[in-house]
Image (tube, coloured by chain):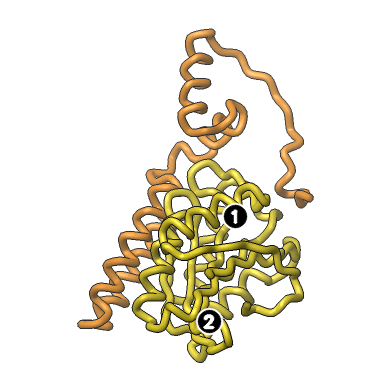
Amino acid sequence: MRAEYDKKNKKTSITMTEEDFVVIERNARLKGMRVSPYMVQCALHHDETLTTEIRAKMQTIMNYAIACVRQYDLTAAEYIHKEAMKIWSL
Amino acid sequence: MVLIKLKKDTYGVASDYLHKSLEYIYNPQKAKYINAFGVAAHDVDSTESQMKYVKGYFHRNADNPLIHIIVSFPKEIKTLQTAIELALHIAFYFKDEYQVIWCIHYKSTERSFYHVHYIINPVCFKDGKLYNSSRKNLYDFTEYVETRTGLKSMFFYGSPTSSDDL
């Protein structure tokens, strides 16, 4: 069951051209999403430079770098970890 | 045979179950090896904050906090290095959609030396969809484990109160 703050209980209608809707619908489908959550996600996170997918994939690369470096230089490994953490606050 | 146990943990949003599970993963007395995809494998707070970031991004804070899968290797797997390689191959199943962190424990039983704990963020970092731990999906996962390890595998559901080992 969803908590109150996660409930999607607000509805609104918007107007757009048929052409725009086709594009939005196609983009949503390409992301494996329905139109409504796709539009919400785009509107809420439009000013974020990195998607969660990119952040997660960058973190995987950082983990690999840390594992490689750790055996030779612990300080460098810590530095990479600290820099990697910044990915999540950009 | 590789045994795969899914622990059914649905302790709800108020619970600090994710934090406790990550503490278990990072326990230096138990963990022989730790690695992760899509999330930091450095300390509890880093991992927890990054998993919560993805949950918050998709407004999925109140859903199941984690998926806990335990994979126990048979006694043919005698070395930590082999266990590390197999655990990595198995984790690739989740790599492109879910944050997953895993640790390897050594416990000598009559059927196994090494087992792996996987803690998975059930919220997909691509589209926010929840991982469905249905019988069908776990069967697919089991087939994947069989293919990647070359070892016969089977899965079963564990209760929330069942042991953390197999």
| Precedes in sequence: disc 2 or disc 1 | 2
Q: Which residue is mark 2?
A: B112
* Camera-nearest label, 2 or 1: 2
| Letter of the chain that mark 1 sits on in the rendering | B
Say which amino acid is labelled 1. Answer: Pro
- CA distance for labels 2 and 1: 28 Å
Q: Is residue B132 above or below residue B28?
A: above
Marker disc for residue B98: none
Q: Secondary structure at mark 2?
A: loop
Q: Position of residue B152 (x, y in %)?
A: 51, 63
Q: Colour of chain B?
A: yellow
Q: Are marks 2 and 1 in contact (CB under 8 Å)?
A: no
Label 2: few (<14), some (14–19) or many (≥20) C-alpha neighbours in 10 Å: many
Q: Secondary structure at mark 1?
A: loop
Look at 69% across and 57% down and name the residue there: B64
Q: Which residue is mark 1?
A: B122
| Letter of the chain that mark 2 sits on in the rendering | B
Say which amino acid is labelled 2. Answer: Ser
Q: Is the residue at mark 2 from the same chain as the one at mark 1? A: yes
Q: Position of residue B148 (x, y in %)?
A: 41, 59
Q: Position of residue B44 (x, y in %)?
A: 52, 75
